[in-house]
Image (spheres, grey):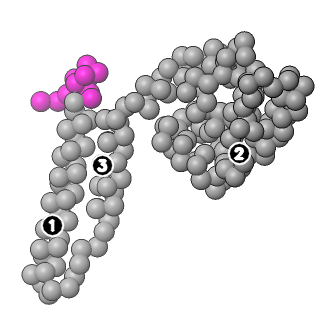
Amino acid sequence: MPSMTPEQARRARRQALRSAVDTAAVCTGIDPGAFFREDGEQQIVWQARRADAMRVCAGCPVRAACEELALRDGDGRSDVDDMVRGGLTGPDLAAARDQQSGRLTAAVAADRDTEGRRLDELTAQLQRAAVKNPDKTGGHRGASRAQAAQNEEVRSLADQIRGIRTARRARAGWRTAA
């Protein structure tokens, strides 16, 4: 999998970020405990383990996706150094979250936009349906039936997309042509 830039990660939805991390993270085979300070662990020991964890993250092609997920999840506290995620410590994550609070609020809201996700899914289905070649077996009548079924599928998907878009525009106060 190619690496993900911070800008790509910021624009991506949670599902895409999660998928990228799940499929390409360097830490996949490493014990998750390596990225968290143990209860009662001495600071000097944690500092060495934290440095190791940060080296792992530094070489990860999806570090930006992991960082973005950590920010959206609200990970890290400014007063507690007890974790590494996306190459950042808990205090680093808290500081970044404070700096980017407006953008993160919008990103979390977009992640919750199930209607938008449905619109994306329907658009992809419509594209696939529009380009598929109907089955030509069964002679002229079979081909006509297959073409009619394909046309109906495309019409149905287009109607669903139009309905969602019209509803979204109406809620946003857009004027629509009568």
Q: Amino acid at mark 2?
A: Asp
Mark 1 or mark 3, earlier in chain: 3
Q: Amino acid at mark 1?
A: Ala
Image quadrant where residue 35 sits: top right
- Residue 31: mark in rendering: 2
**At x 22% / y 57%, what residue is drawn?**
154
Query: Residue placed farthest to the left in the image?
Result: 141
Q: Amino acid at mark 3?
A: Leu
Q: Position of residue 74 (x, y in %)?
A: 58, 22
Residue beneath label 3, please?
A: 122
Say which element carries label 3: helix
User: Is residue 17 in sight in this rendering?
Assistant: yes
Say which element carries label 2: loop
As measured in the structure, the alpha-carbon distance from the residue carrying label 3 to the one carrying label 2 is: 39 Å
Residue 64 is left or right of residue 159, and the answer is right
Above or below 136: residue 94: above
- Residue 149: mark in rendering: 1
Residue range highlighted in magenta: 168-178
